[in-house]
Image (cartoon, rainbow, N blue to C red):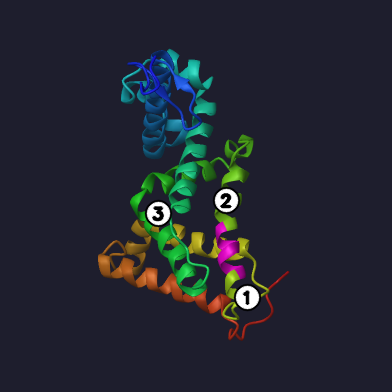
Amino acid sequence: MSKTETNPPGRRRTASGQRVGVRELSAQATRASILNAAIKVFAKSGYAGGRVEQISKTAKSFDRMIYYYFGSKEKLFIAALEEIYRRFCEAEAKVIFNADHPIESLRTVVLFTWTYYQKHPEFITLLNSENLHRGRHISKSMRAREYSGAAISILDTVLKSGVEKGVFRADVQARDVYLMIASMGYFYLSNRFTLSAFLGENLEAAPALAHWENFITQAVLRVVSPATTAAPWPS
């Protein structure tokens, strides 16, 4: 092989420069296809209703391949939950935050989360399904805490920047602000159908969505503002 020759046909290199053969590429593609199919099926039918044969059919694969790559339906469901968290964190990591402008950065965090939930309804429906099972499956994940740590770390950096510049309170925890942002967006979208009927208005209408986006943003900014006159933040 000459010094200028690239990878041989049927092979490519990973990010670390390691060559990957045709067989491994095929295995990766099959596993990814099954995982994507599982996310679709579980998001639509839940864990109990999502059948292995449905998933293999959607993936254009075979039942035995699911057991080969994932071991069981439960392990596949856990992998699906891990994958939606991974995608969320990967998307958030691509967002650009300016430490010199913490208020705008916090707005960006809110907007990213709210927009991501809208663009990825499978994120909400899969988590709804897992909550019906009281987190029984995700509690077995070795990666869930890793993903949550990444998400909160970004918010913590933004908040600390705001404290240093005197525009945010020093007694507010990133974990609490994260829960505030997530819950206000998640609850609205996961319950929008019943709430629309209950309130007598279409919460999916563009003006309603824009209004709630602004409401969440202003609520979060008021909470972290040093001018907030509320009682001291619980430690």
In this view, which residue lies farthest toward the right? 235
Quadrant occupied by the N terminus: top left
Tell me the CA gap for discs 1 and 3. 31 Å
Residue nearer the viewer, 20 or 223: 20
Q: Which amino acid, by three-letter code, is at mark 1? A: Glu
Q: Which amino acid, by three-letter code, is at mark 2? A: Ala
- Kindly identify which residue carries mark 1: 164
Q: Name the residue located 49 percent from the left edge and 42 percent from the top edge.
A: 86
User: Which is closer to the viewer, label 3 or label 2?
Assistant: 2
Q: Name the residue located 51 percent from the left edge and 72 percent from the top edge.
A: 100
x then y, percent, for residue 169: 63, 77
Above or below — where is 181 with respect to 71? below
- Kindly identify which residue carries mark 2: 150
- Kindly identify which residue carries mark 3: 117
Q: Which amino acid, by three-letter code, is at mark 3? A: Tyr
Tell me which segment is drawn in magenta: 154-160
Q: Secondary structure at mark 3?
A: helix
Q: Earlier in the sequence, mark 1 or mark 3?
A: 3
Magenta-drawn stretch contains 156: yes
Residue nearer the viewer, 128 or 99: 99
Residue nearer the viewer, 201 or 115: 115
Q: Earlier in the sequence, mark 2 or mark 1?
A: 2
